[in-house]
Image: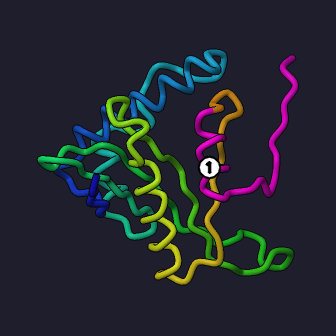
Amino acid sequence: MSYLVRRAAEKDIPSLMELLKQVNKVHYDGRPDLFKLETKYSPDELSKIIADNDTPVFVCEGEGGKVLGHGFCVMQRPENTRLLTDILTLYIDDICVDESARGMHVGEAIYEHIIEYARSNGCYNVTLNVWSCNPGAMKFYEKMGLVPYKVGMEKIL
């Protein structure tokens, strides 16, 4: 199947809100001690994010223009360039594929588009965080060729 991956627009906000609910539910189910059943952003916040070139948001369209997934990104530079090399990183804040479209390579289409976007904008690398309570996402990112570069750890008290 052929998909169109493009920058998100105002008209996509209702679809983005639905996808944000789905991804939050995965996190809530995995770590109800940390996550609430809420969306990460409000429609007004989404409007501002979509309009900002430093926070590109992409959507993947299927037949009839239906939004099948999204990719939220953030352009980043290190805060401490005395210690760290001053590189441009594209951080993937969130990729979500609609439940009805999982297994149809939508996530791969979004990810590949993000990689090309990062290359064309002079990024050195692409990074992301993945919750260990989301083994499906971990498997997907490993399949896409990502490798761990730092690990967060916790002890619940």
Span highlighted in magenta in the image: 136-157
Residue type at mark 1: give it: Tyr
Residue situated in front as seen by the camera: 42 or 139: 139
**Does residue 118 appear left or right of residue 39 in this picture?**
right
- What's the residue at 43%, 38% (across, down)? 103
Q: Secondary structure at mark 1?
A: helix
Residue 146 belongs to magenta span: yes
In this figure, which colouring scheme has been used for the structure?
rainbow
- What's the residue at 55%, 20% (across, down)? 28
- What's the residue at 35%, 58% (across, down)? 58
Task: Give how far across and how far down residue 40 sits, in percent.
Answer: 45, 36
**Does residue 4 appear left or right of residue 118 in this picture?**
left
Q: Which residue is mark 1?
A: 141
Q: Is residue 107 above or below residue 99?
A: below
Residue 110, picture quadrant: bottom left
**Does residue 127 appear left or right of residue 72 in this picture?**
right
Which residue reaches farthest front? 1
Task: Give how far across and how far down residue 120 sits, in percent.
Answer: 47, 82
Residue 150 belongs to magenta span: yes
- What's the residue at 84%, 31% (across, down)? 154
Dot 1 surroundings within 10 Å: few (below 14), some, or many (20 or more)? some
Task: Give how far across and how far down residue 116 sits, in percent.
Answer: 47, 73
Q: Is residue 15 above or below residue 76?
A: above
